[in-house]
Image: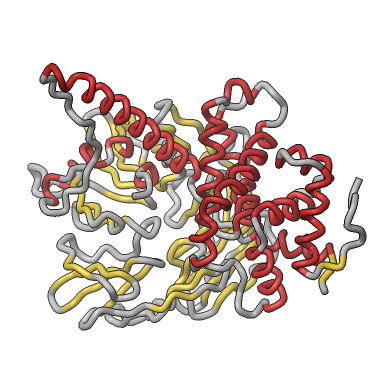
Amino acid sequence: MITEDELAGALRTIADRAEDRDVLTGVETKRRRRTRKRLRRTLATACSLAAGWGVLVAWPTYSGVDTAQPATNTVERMWPDALFTMPGQSRPLAAISATQVLVWAERGALEVYDAASGRSRPVTALAQAPLSLAVDHERVVWLADGHAWAAPLQAGGKMTKIGPVPGGEHVDRIALAGRYLVWSSPLDGVWRMSVTGGAPERVATGLQIVQWPWATDEPLDTRANPTKVVNLQTGRSIKISAVPGAEGLRCGPTWCTGSRGQEHIVQKIDGSWSRTYRAGSPGYPYRDRFFVGLGEIYDASTDATVAFEGAKIDASGGRKWSEGNGVVFWPHPAGVRVVNLAAIPRA
Amino acid sequence: MVEFEEFVRARSHALLRYGLVLTGSADDAADLVQEALLKLGSSWRRVRNKDDPEGYVRTIMARQHVSWWRRRRREHLTAEVPSPVREDEPELGEIWQRLRALPAGQRAVLVLRYHEDLSDQEIAARLGISPATVRSQASRALATLRVRARAFTGRRR
């Protein structure tokens, strides 16, 4: 027998483990699908009415995946809603949502740029763009001078020093997990600290963050394979099964990339599927789906390789594109051209 | 005045929490939240002028969940769903398994009572059923879960 209070406590504990998701994009996708369905029904009716007069009505089509000819897949064609031009010379740092990206403006400030309205709003003054940061819908956190810092994204907030991060110079991944800043380094496991301050506490040993809440036992040897990907919120562990000959795998909960002989490969985490990947070794996936390689974005969920304008070799023989967390960008006569991977609906 | 996107950004995590305890699955929770917000979005101008758009969404979620469950229960009974409970939490795991096995209507009543802290009258209004049905659903669910209730009728308020 349990008590009512224990039942209430159990429900609270479970609720606390809800994973954050980009709900707005999902709503938008559902809305579009319904609109298309309505349109198709309307056109079907129109077709059947018009058929007697020999009228041809084009069937509406939408962004089909063309994996046979990857070169013809461009961001403009495949993901038009994810592409925008931002005026000025701000540097995109990370995707926040389907329309918002965090940017660093050259005058020395973090800002949120909204592609829907075409406007920026200031977050906080900051002399240099942070090298290590994480952002969610509420705040941005970053590491600088051995300390963790935070600033709310809403207007009027102030930058605050959260506290010292021990071994900060070795930290190579940070994430936001609700009210916690989480970080990991190759030898020291995963730690967390409340965004309001307090003592750091160890969350896991022997693991490195992939993308919260997922972590992996990434080996120091770049040619060795990890064995598992673990959900740090629920404890669920997914075994990695390397395809024969695969080395240096780096995995999210569904997909891995690595090499096999002279080739780069992408494979499913359970080893049930793999293919060669021509655009170099791209590391960990963004949102368990997108790999940004040498001038191409690969969407593992649809097996589509998508090219973008900035990756073309220019007159100087170089490529001018760069990337942040969930953003790919390059210079453009009107400012900065940006692909926001968070704006791409689920497949 | 709050715009729809602002409302979604501000409240989506709270709704996902509610969705997870209602449905028992992170994917179903996200689906349920999105479906409810889609409906809210189409009537946002009307709803935002009232005081409680979130109550409106939560009502849609509870009712939609019960309706979906009736349609999908065969799939759900066989589907493997990632558990939010760790292996080293056997007591929590047992409560969770029993909660998940409850019919959606009974589970919704328990969630609204013990997680949302609503009175039986409020639960009845949210689910569109009578207070008597709320009490009988709660009574059966608590018996299945082997919960030692203080009282089966009118627990609070």
Q: Is residue A168 visible?
A: no
Position in image of residue B65 (x %, y %): 60, 48
Q: Is residue B19 left or right of residue B124?
A: left
Residue at the location (80% across, 40% down)? Answer: B122
User: Is A53 situated above or below A94?
Assistant: above
Quarter of the image containing the C terminus of chain B?
A: top right
Q: Is residue A50 left or right of residue A299?
A: left
Residue at the location (47% across, 37% down)? Answer: A111
Q: Nearer the viewer, residue B67 or A307?
A: B67
Q: Is residue A71 left or right of residue A331?
A: left
Position in image of residue B68 (x %, y %): 55, 48
User: Is B14 situated above or below A116?
Assistant: below
Quarter of the image containing the N terminus of chain B?
A: top right
Residue at the location (24% across, 40% down)? Answer: A63
Among the 4 quarters of the image, the one containing residue A278: bottom left
User: Is B55 situated above or below A264?
Assistant: above
Position in image of residue B23 (x %, y %): 60, 55
